[in-house]
Every structure is written in structure tokens, then in C-alpha cells.
Image (cartoon, rainbow, N blue to C red):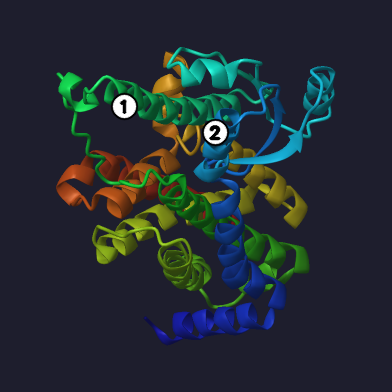
Amino acid sequence: MDSRLFHFVKKEFIQFFRDRRMLAVAMLAPILQIIFLGYVASTDIKHVSTAVLDQDKTSYSRTYLQSFKNSGYFNINYYLSDQNQIADLLDEGKVKLVINIPHGFGRKIARYEASDVQAIIDGSNASTAATIQNYINQINFTNSNLLLQKKLAHFGLSAYNFDFIDINSRIWYNPELKSVNYMVPAIFALILMLSSMLLTTVAIVKEKENGTMEMLIVTPLKPYEIILGKLIPFIMISFIDIALIFLVATIWFSVPMKGSIGLLFLLGGIFISTGLGLGVFISTISQTQRQAIMISSFIMMPSFILSGFVFPIANMPKFIQFLTNFIPMRYFLSIVRGLFLKGIGLNYLWPDVWPLIVFGVVILTLSIIRFKKKIG
């Protein structure tokens, strides 16, 4: 690195660390974002507000309701005395589930007969309702299995005599089925893309707003030195962000890192080049920081929706699936999830790595060419 470029990069670092707002955005914001989003993005549903109408009021009905409490998924906040109260609680959004136990429930159970229980679920959020339904099915299966064993024992039989098919299930990669283990690596990619793109965009546009860009153009610095001087600090800052986000993901959220940390940084650097390239491009078409932020938001929204961050790409229409091939974050999401959860190597990740390299090289090259024309 020649002396002019070295001193220019040094100047950029000094200027960056003097700007407390930019420093907060670069260092503090990614940490806060992954902490907040890590909790918000979890699809695990617990402490479901529940109301109970126990018309039986027997030890059997109380035992059945206790199984809902013990599951950890449901909080029984309301005990009803009349069916007319059900609609009001659901309409007001105070409960997501109402359990209605009819008269005679305990008598039928004591006779080892089937008994109906009504579960009324707020279905306004289809995903939440489906999860609640699955929880209820699990609880009912456990209760029914216990009753079956008692009934068979009553007749001197064992339930194990009837297990003709024994299924031994093993869950790989995420044995505890924690959604946070799946979502936090995705948030890792989202924040990295957002921070690398926004930092570059705002820094360059700020120079244009302050009129210092014109001053740089008339200095002895060559166009490529101006570009490198602007990009090198943010490349290094982005790598610091990778380290900070990685530490929060693995220490704060206890997400297992089964793959190579070095490979994560290497492929993260390739992904950073895409964000930096987009940042340079946005800076060439924006005159103010407000415009730059609006354009960045316009780019980030499709990346968020079409990358498979939340919605599986396989469930999208064929035409939309085709469009996702042009979303760089799609490939990095697959990479970080593969590294964190599966611990796979480059030979398995290569189908996602080479498109990411192509996008990074193309976007960064075209953006630099456009930037050179603007300052040339």
C-alpha cells in the first residue's frame, strides 16, 4: 500500500471513530439487532393464554388440565363459569385457547370410555393456531397412552404387547428442535448484509452532502485510491461485525457452531463484498442520506422475503422461486445454516458458494466502475 493510500485509509478510520453515530451503527447496532431479533424471530410458542370451562369438576378433569400446565406451553389465566364468556375472551384477544370439559368427563374416563373435550383456538394467526393444535395433540396422545396402559393393566395386559412397529426416531442437526438455532444464523446474514451496505452508502453520501467528495477528487489521489480508501475501513469493520455477531449467537443464544469458524469468516467476506458493492452503487444514485436509506430499504425488503429467511422457497410459486436465484442472501443463508447446524464443509457448500462469488464480483466491479465515472 503506497503512502498516499495508507494516509487516506488512516484518515477515514480517524473520521469514522470521531463520528459517534456511525460508530454506534457499526458496532453497537448489530449486537442489539441480533439480540432483539433473535428473541422476536423465534417460532417457538410458549405461555399461551388459556381459558378453561370445567363443567365436570372432578379429579379426572383437574388431572387433565394439570397436564396442560405442566407442559410449559399454556398459562391457564381464566376459569369460566358459563359458555357465553368464551366468545368475549376470544374477541378481545385475551386468550388464544379455550378448553371446554363437558359433564360426565370423569365418569367416562373412570369406565375407560372415550370422552370428548372441546378446544377452541383463535385461528386469526394460522401459524400460531397450527402450533397450538400440535401441542394439544401431543398432550392428548400422552394422556390417552397413560389411560390405555391403565386399562390394559386392569385386564392383566401390557401395552407393550401391542407394539407391532417400534419407531426409533433420531433428529439430526437440531435435536431439541429449537427454532432459535435455525433463525439466529439467518439473522446473522441479514444484519451483515444490512450493516455492510448501509455503512458504505451513508459514508459516501455524507461526503457528497458535506461537499468533501469534490475536495477529494481534486487531490492527487487516483480514483482507485479513493475507492479503496473508502472500502478498506468498512471491510475491516464488517469483519469485526462478523466476530461480534458470532459471539452473540454462540454465547448469548447458545447456537451450536459445528462447522469451521475460519470458513465462516472467509465466506462472510465474500458476502460482505456484495453488501459493499450495493452500498457503492446506491451512493452513486443518491444525493442525500435520506434517499440512500430509502433505496437501501427497497433492496433489503425483497432480500428478506425471497431469501428463505422465514418463508420456505419450495413453497413459493415457480416464477417467484426463479427470482430468488438473483437474491445473494439466499445463498449465504444456506451457507451459514449449513455451517452452524450441520458442520458441513466447502465440498457440500460449493453449490451456494460459487453463485455468491459471482454476485460479489459482478456487483462490486460494476459499482466501482460507476463510482469511477462519477468522480472521474
- The disc placed on residue 134 is none
Q: Is residue 274 left or right of residue 129?
A: left
Q: Residue 62: in sight, yes or no?
A: yes
Q: Are marks 1 and 2 in contact (CB under 8 Å)?
A: no
Q: Quadrant of residue 97?
A: top right
Q: Looking at the image, is mark 1 or mark 2 earlier in the sequence?
A: 1
Q: Position of residue 9 (x, y in %)?
A: 50, 79
In this rendering, which labeled residue sits more in front, label 1 or label 2? 1
Name the spot of residue 227 as percent of width and height, x first: 50, 65
Position of residue 25 relative to residue 96, above or below, is below
In the foreground, 204 or 115? 115
Q: Give how far across and how far down residue 247 sits, in percent.
A: 43, 69
Secondary structure of residue under mark 1: helix
Residue to which mark 2 is pinned = 305
Q: Which amino acid does label 2 sit on?
A: Ile
Q: In which quarter of the image is the C terminus?
A: bottom right
Q: Which residue is drawn at 68% across and 23% down?
A: 122
Circle 2: element type: helix
Picture quadrant of residue 36: bottom right
Query: The residue under label 1 is which amino acid type?
Result: Gln
Q: In which quarter of the image is residue 121?
A: top right
Q: Residue at label 1? A: 149
How far apart are labels 1 and 2 at the CA level?
A: 48 Å
Q: Measuring 21% from the left and 22% from the top, which residue is drawn there?
A: 157
Q: Position of residue 64 (x, y in %)?
A: 54, 31
* Residue 376 visible in the shown view: no
